[in-house]
Amino acid sequence: MWRAHYRVFNALKKEQSKYNGTWTLTQTNDNQLYVECSETMKVDSSYGTQDGNAIDPLYKVLVACPTTKSLSLSVSQGGCSIGDDPWSFNWRAGDRFPDLEALTLSGYDWESESGFDWSTRRPPSIDAWKAAMNWDLLKRLDLDRPPNSFLEAFRGELRSLEALILRPRWGFWGDEDTFCVFDEAAKQLRENYTTFIAALPPLRELSISGMGELLNITPILEAHGPSLRKLIIHEFERDCTYESGNATLIRPFLNVAQIEEIKTAAPNLESLSLDVYRSANRWPTTIFKALTAFPNLSNLTLHFDLEDAWRSRRTKQCYLRNEDSIWDKYCTVHELMQPILNRTAAQTIIHDLRLNQSSMKLQHVTMYVGDFERRQGGGLRHEAHNEHNRPMRFDCWVEEGGLERCKAVEGSLYDGDESLGFDE
């Protein structure tokens, strides 16, 4: 077992059990820390807090631990004390990282010039990491939305990749930022994401979210359809209303023809997650019918809108001066989308889906309304001085004997305010 011996900051806990997915740290009398290498490493670096900088210590660990196979790293500003903290590794020429099989990154600055002179076409952090690791062995890559320079550097690479997860970009405070830009440059960037994904080896798992618009699914399915077992296509609810200037803008949804295209191109799909829109106060029965045609689908996740952007009302309570002009401007909330998704409706949906699926393989359906458990700073925007609608999740499953059951779970809100209730 390899051990790295170095001085670290308060970012790393003094005792971390190997059983919780990180490594073991032991403090000595001279205030040094011995690090016992593990196959799995997980670090959350939150600046402006007592944790501090974990990037530099982690770099030393990775250089010293060739047996590590999985790395998860998140970087964000957690407190109000803002300094010159690193958001990427301070690369040193000749250092090697272990040959990872799984990599998860959030908030990492791929375009940092830290530690290198500007002497290559691509940003140094990308070049350095590409040279310091054998990327051909990587099987799972989970990133918050990487920059175009990453796409250029790794297009056609990653020859062993089996799973790709692209999530919303982490902002400075660790919030999840949808790509809400719609000019020609943004259009080209989305096309670059499409060609990057299509150039990868056949994937078993693909997740795309936070793009602001749907990527062209056709070339992606042509490359990965036969091998796909799990597919996620998801956008947050009404995230781009401000940037678009359209207060009633809804997130993009797959239509029936696109769902049928997925079914035809990916016949072995076992797990599917997508956004579903209710219009004219009706359940999207044509979408439900298209979903029942997937012959091997056993797990399904549906994201429904929580709020109706076209209808609003005054809140029942508001912590501002009781004047009509103030309440009309600041103390309103959108009405809930109709029909309301409650536990009874969820049980009806899973029952009808299974009834119309000829293979009867569907065993689990998860339904969301709103941005359930979205990170701090995200979620549907609301004023902190009034009530608001709370996201919900409904977990539905099939018991022995074929009976469908559903459980309602109320979502937590990042500011802890009270909320409007839901019928269960």
Image: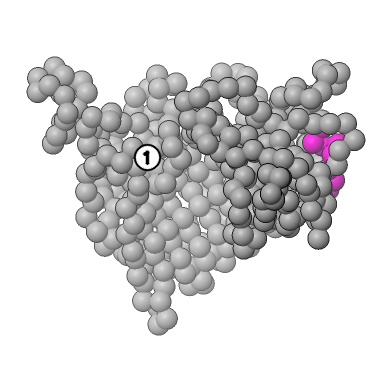
Total labels: the figure holds 1
Per the image, the residue denoted by label 1 is 414
Q: Residue furthest front?
A: 29
Dot 1 alpha-carbon crowd within 10 angstroms: few under 14, some 14 to 19, many 20 or more = few
Name the one closer to the observer, 182 or 315: 315
Q: Residue furthest bottom?
A: 401
Q: Which residues are magenta?
A: 128-140
What is the quadrant of the N terminus in the image? bottom right
At numbered mark 1, what does the secondary structure look like: helix, strand or loop? loop
Q: Residue at x 41, y 69 (%)?
A: 397
Image quadrant assignment for residue 107: top right
Name the one closer to the observer, 213 or 131: 131
Image quadrant assignment for residue 404: bottom left
- Please state the horizontal and vertical placement of residue 386, each as a whole percent of the image: 21, 32
Kind of residue at disc 1: Tyr
Dominant SS in magenta:
helix
What is the quadrant of the C terminus in the image? bottom left
Name the one closer to the observer, 381 or 279: 381
Q: Residue at x 51, y 71 (%)?
A: 361
Q: Horizontal placement of 294 versus 226: left or right?
A: left
Q: Residue at x 71, y 45 (%)?
A: 30
- Please state the horizontal and vertical placement of residue 391, each as a whole percent of the image: 33, 46
Query: Is 129 contained in the magenta span?
Result: yes
- Please state the horizontal and vertical placement of residue 249, each as a whole percent of the image: 38, 29
Q: How is the image coloured?
A: one colour
Q: Horizontal placement of 399 versus 410: left or right?
A: right
Determine whether 34 is above or below 295 in the image.
above
Q: Residue at x 13, y 17 (%)?
A: 325
- Please state the horizontal and vertical placement of residue 182, each as a whole percent of the image: 53, 22
Q: Is residue 184 visible?
A: yes
